[in-house]
Image (spheres, rainbow, N blue to C red):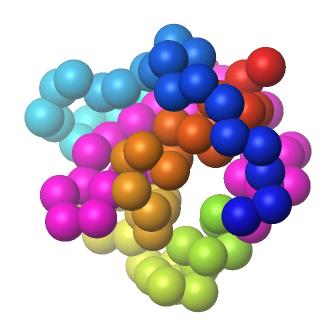
Amino acid sequence: MGFRLTAITSAKKSLTRSLSGSKTLDIPKGYFAVYVGESQKKRFMVPISYLNHPSFQDLLRQAEEEFGFDHPMGGITIPCSEHTFFELTSSLSE
């Protein structure tokens, strides 16, 4: 991938993981839900500002190619591992 990999810890600070198992609309203003993971999907809240970053836009294009626009879980499904997602988002939060 064409982005710089940084520490995973900063990504964990910038992301807000939904700890509730519910799929209600408990998304804070300025965030949107994504589901990440290979076998078991985990829900994360990411800032809307990430939509402006080319590397995140590339990830969304991959999601569109793999899953289309049908997201039965209620949020966007990202086709990568949690580790890769944390690396990408940590570079965006700097």
- Rendered residue at 32%/42% (across/down): 43
**In the shown orientation, is residue 92 left or right of residue 37?**
right
x and y, in percent, of residue 3 in the image: 78, 51
x and y, in percent, of residue 10 in the image: 58, 17
Residue nearest the viewer, comparing 21 with 78 = 78
x and y, in percent, of residue 78 in the image: 47, 62
Residue stretch in magenta: 29-58
**In the shown orientation, is residue 55 left or right of residue 74?**
right
Specify whether residue 23 is painted magenta: no
**In the shown orientation, is residue 25 left or right of residue 66?**
left
Quadrant the C terminus occupies: top right
Does residue 15 lie above or below 24 as drawn? above
Residue 57 visible at all:
no
| Quadrant of the rendered image containing residue 90 | top right
Does residue 88 lie above or below 71 as drawn? above
- Rendered residue at 73%/33% (across/down): 91
Count of numbered circles on the image: 0
**In the shown orientation, is residue 55 left or right of residue 12?**
right
- Rendered residue at 50%/50% (across/down): 84
Residue nearest the viewer, comparing 83 with 45 = 83
| Quadrant of the rendered image containing residue 14 | top right
Specify whether residue 52 is painted magenta: yes
Does residue 56 lie above or below 70 as drawn? above
Residue nearest the viewer, comparing 39 with 84 = 84
